[in-house]
Image: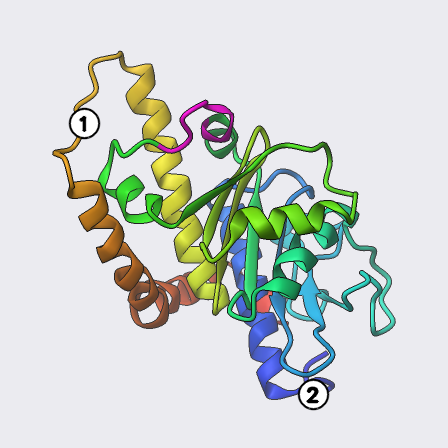
């Protein structure tokens, strides 16, 4: 695929393939059943999505499928796409010009918090950093109904993270790195909440007003971490794990 697409698209393919490999490395994958996407620049509104029949540790830059807003591959491919992945991701990509990348996961901790009546609680600094930018969407079944897209978009609004109730987690970003770092913080916050609540009911709530302060700090800090700090480090990690992802 390298040399057959623009340099800009190739870099997006590398970033997205790296994200798939890193999700597998951190144990966030769910066999083949979750998905991440990134929009390809251009008026066609195409985006890249994972092949449905590959494990995340098998995804490469060249194997990613370029699809249109109807979910159809725009280039010949031996692979198939995930219909539910198309529904969720196309909804966000069509509605949010700033949502160039979308990540959706089904981790046990993310699902547990998504099933909790109060959602994500401000029990840790990590939760407070992302909590002010968190939306909620009620479960409607496996996301194959295209009419659900309007409700996903309405519930997400201008926020950059979402708990899909009884389902999982979702984050968006201007770059793959930004969406990944935001997901890292959201998943860590969910994991910590499950640990804290399982340890007993005597949790320490933060002082009044501090969750709002942390949320404002997170709005700036997460973008900086993605652009300048953590994502470049994570790319180096992906190359150390297996450089074949960039092929």
Does the rendering let one see residue 217?
Answer: yes
Rounded to the nearest angstrom, the CA distance separating label 2 from label 1 is 54 Å
Considering the numbered disc 1 on the image, is that residue within a helix, a strand or a loop?
Answer: loop
Give x and y (percent) for residue 188. 36, 40
Q: Which residues are magenta?
A: 113-120
Is tag 2's residue or tag 1's residue first in the polypeptide sequence? 2
Answer whether residue 147 is magenta in the image: no
In this view of the protein, which residue sits in the foreground, 57 or 113? 113
In this view of the protein, which residue sits in the foreground, 247 or 212? 212
> Is 46 rendered above or below residue 4?
above
Magenta-drawn stretch, dominant element (helix, strand or loop): loop
Residue at which label 2 appears: 3
User: Horizontal placement of 29 versus 145: left or right?
Assistant: left
Check contact, mark 2 vs mark 1: CB within 8 A: no
Give x and y (percent) for residue 34. 64, 45
Name the image quarter holding the C terminus: bottom right
Which residue is at 52% across, 30% downward? 111
Give x and y (percent) for residue 245. 59, 64
Residue at which label 1 appears: 205
Circle 2 packing at 10 Å, graded few (<14), some (14-19), many (20+), is few
Does the rendering let one see residue 244?
Answer: no
User: Horizontal placement of 96 versus 47: left or right?
Assistant: left
């Amino acid at each position: 695929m390298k040399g057959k697409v623009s340099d800009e698209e190739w870099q997006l393919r590398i970033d997205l393939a790296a994200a798939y490999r890193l999700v597998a490395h951190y144990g966030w994958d769910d066999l083949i059943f979750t998905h991440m996407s990134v929009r390809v620049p251009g008026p066609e509104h195409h985006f890249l999505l994972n092949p449905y029949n590959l494990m995340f540790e098998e995804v490469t830059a060249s194997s990613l499928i370029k699809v249109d807003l109807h979910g159809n591959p725009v280039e010949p491919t031996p692979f198939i796409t995930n219909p539910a992945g198309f529904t969720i991701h196309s909804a966000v990509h069509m509605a949010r010009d700033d949502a160039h990348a979308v990540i959706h996961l089904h981790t046990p901790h993310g699902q547990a918090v998504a099933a909790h009546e109060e959602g994500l609680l401000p029990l840790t600094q990590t939760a407070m950093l992302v909590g002010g930018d968190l939306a909620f969407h009620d479960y409607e079944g496996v996301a194959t109904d295209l009419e659900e897209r309007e409700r996903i978009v309405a519930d997400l609004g201008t926020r950059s993270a979402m708990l899909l109730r009884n389902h999982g987690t979702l984050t968006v970003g201007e770059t793959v790195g930004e969406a990944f770092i935001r997901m890292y913080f959201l998943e860590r916050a969910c994991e910590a909440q499950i640990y804290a609540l399982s340890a007993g009911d005597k949790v320490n709530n933060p002082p009044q007003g501090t969750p709002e302060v942390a949320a404002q700090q997170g709005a700036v800090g997460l973008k900086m971490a993605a652009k300048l700090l953590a994502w470049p480090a994570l790319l180096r990690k992906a190359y150390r794990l297996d450089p074949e992802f960039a092929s």
